[in-house]
Amino acid sequence: MRDVTPDLFFASIAEREVQYNARASVADFDACVRRYAESAARVRTRRPAVLNLRYGMGQDERLDLFLPAAAQASAPLFVFIHGGYWRSQRKEDAPVMAEAFNAAGAAVATLEYTLLPEATLPEVVREVRSAVAWLYRNAAAYGVDPARIYVSGSSAGGHLAGMLAAPDWQARYGVPDDVIKGTLALSGLFDLRPLCDISVSDWLRLTPEQARLQSPIFHLPAQAGPMLLAVGGLETQGFKNQTDAYEAAWRAAGLSATRIATPQCNHFDLVNELEDPDSDLTRATLEMMGLR
């Protein structure tokens, strides 16, 4: 892998603060959050769901499952992990894609996890891996195909999706090495070392050495299903460079990585592209899942 440090660390800590400040990159952050909530509320009135399934013992180790109309064949599963810099947001505002994906024949699971700083980041990674293992073992009871699990996440959730695509954890959780059949990572943070000495460190609380251990860019599988990547054209250069670096790393490792262009999107409305069944992002994701 090429040295990506100059692209991700920038010239000064002050500049890095700007480049990794997602909230400051939009004119009205509160409006973005309201849009998530309103979209999720619509989904909850229109789609059947099984809510607050417990995948672990912790209070926040829960998931919601949105199911397509009954069909003869079991449905592929799209697992979505919310963002919020690992310290905010909830699964209740995450299922904006459920209506479009259910209509295409996919089930959707939205994950909750213990937020930082109550949990450490390694604990959060363990939780989302436990959630996938739980889904693998229990999916069939809900008409979902455990052999067709795809994962996705936005921002911090994109990081966690990358850690699910990483190798060397599956056997410890009792799932096949290829339990993840494909990944969609939106505006992810793939090398966490640049965050260790800016304000994010107030809750991330990792040394650079520890951050490397939790960075997907340093934990690439030998073989994997497709990786779809997108970052909004209106985002900061910091988030763009993170996706550039991760894409380059996957390609250098001989793995499949496809970039979906979203020039019209910012850091927060990118995920709303998945509400539209005809958006490029939705089409590419459903194609990856064998539904187009």
Image (cartoon, helix red, strand yellow):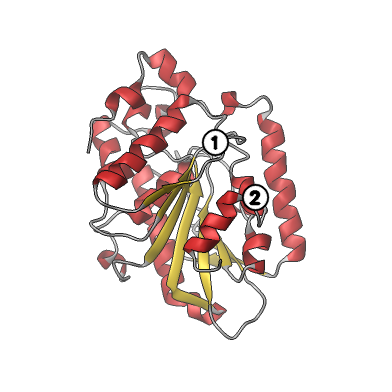
Q: Nearer the viewer, mark 1 or mark 2?
A: 1
Q: CA distance from mark 1 to mark 2?
A: 20 Å
Residues packed near mark 1 inside 10 Å, few (<14), some (14 to 19) or many (20 plus): many
At x 39%, y 28%, the residue is: 201
Q: Earlier in the sequence, mark 1 or mark 2?
A: 2
Whole-percent x and y of residue 48?
70, 70
In this picture, is 32 found above or below 132? Answer: above
Q: Secondary structure at mark 2?
A: helix
Q: Is residue 174 visible?
A: yes
- Which of 175/264 is in front? 264
At x 38%, y 43%, the residue is: 121
Whole-percent x and y of residue 245?
34, 36
Whole-percent x and y of residue 1?
22, 39
Numbered circle sitting on residue 19: none
Q: Amino acid at mark 1?
A: Gly
Numbered circle sitting on residue 93: 2
Quarter occupied by the C terminus: bottom right
Left/right placement of residue 197 relative to residue 85 reads left
Q: Amino acid at mark 2?
A: Asp
In this picture, is 110 found above or below 268? Answer: below
Numbered circle sitting on residue 232: 1
- Which of 124/248 is in front? 248
In this picture, is 191 found above or below 159? Answer: above
Q: Is residue 57 visible?
A: no
In this picture, is 236 found above or below 134? Answer: above
Q: Secondary structure at mark 1?
A: loop
Q: Quadrant of residue 5?
A: top left
- Which of 215/100 is in front? 100
